[in-house]
Image (tube, rainbow, N blue to C red):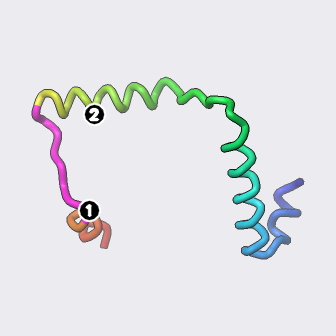
Amino acid sequence: MTILEIKKMSVSERIQAMEVLWDSLISHNAEIDSPKWHYDVLDQRKKKIDSGEAEFISLDDLASRRK
């Protein structure tokens, strides 16, 4: 399937295709390794939390910042 064929699909057809693809990935049982940079970011965040440097905000505060 090409991007041109996908663009010809309706939005609901594209969503349905994504759901089928997602279901096929979930049922595959193969573990997907995260890239190294994911672990690096998590490690940096944990260090900030452990050192007391991390700042936490509520979801409401986050939402208000996006406006």
Determine whether 64 is above or below 50 in the image. Answer: below
Q: Gap between marks 2 and 1, in whole Å?
A: 18 Å
Q: Quadrant of the N terminus?
A: bottom right
The tally of labels here is: 2
Q: Tell me the kind of residue under disc 2.
A: Arg
Kindly identify which residue carries mark 1: 59
Residue 44 x/y as whole percent? 29, 28
Q: Secondary structure at mark 2?
A: helix
Check if mark 2's residue and mark 1's residue have beta carbons within 8 Å: no
Q: Residues within 10 Å of mark 1 (few under 14, many from 20)?
A: few
| Residue located at (86% from left, 62% from top) | 4
Q: Tell me the kind of residue under disc 1.
A: Leu
Q: Nearer the viewer, residue 18 or 41?
A: 18
Q: Secondary structure at mark 1?
A: helix
Residue range in magenta is 52-59
Residue 50 x/y as whole percent? 16, 28
Q: Nearer the viewer, mark 2 or mark 1?
A: 1
Determine whether 27 is above or below 46 in the image. Answer: below
Kindly identify which residue carries mark 2: 45
| Residue located at (68% from left, 33% from top) | 29
| Residue located at (12% from left, 28% from top) | 51
Examine the residues drawn in magenta and state their main secondary structure.
loop
Residue 42 x/y as whole percent? 35, 31
Q: Earlier in the sequence, mark 2 or mark 1?
A: 2
Q: Is residue 42 magenta?
A: no
Image side of residue 45 versus residue 19, left or right: left
Q: Quadrant of residue 13?
A: bottom right
Image side of residue 19 versus residue 8, left or right: left
Q: Quadrant of residue 45?
A: top left
Q: Residues within 10 Å of mark 2 (few under 14, many from 20)?
A: some
Q: Is residue 55 magenta?
A: yes
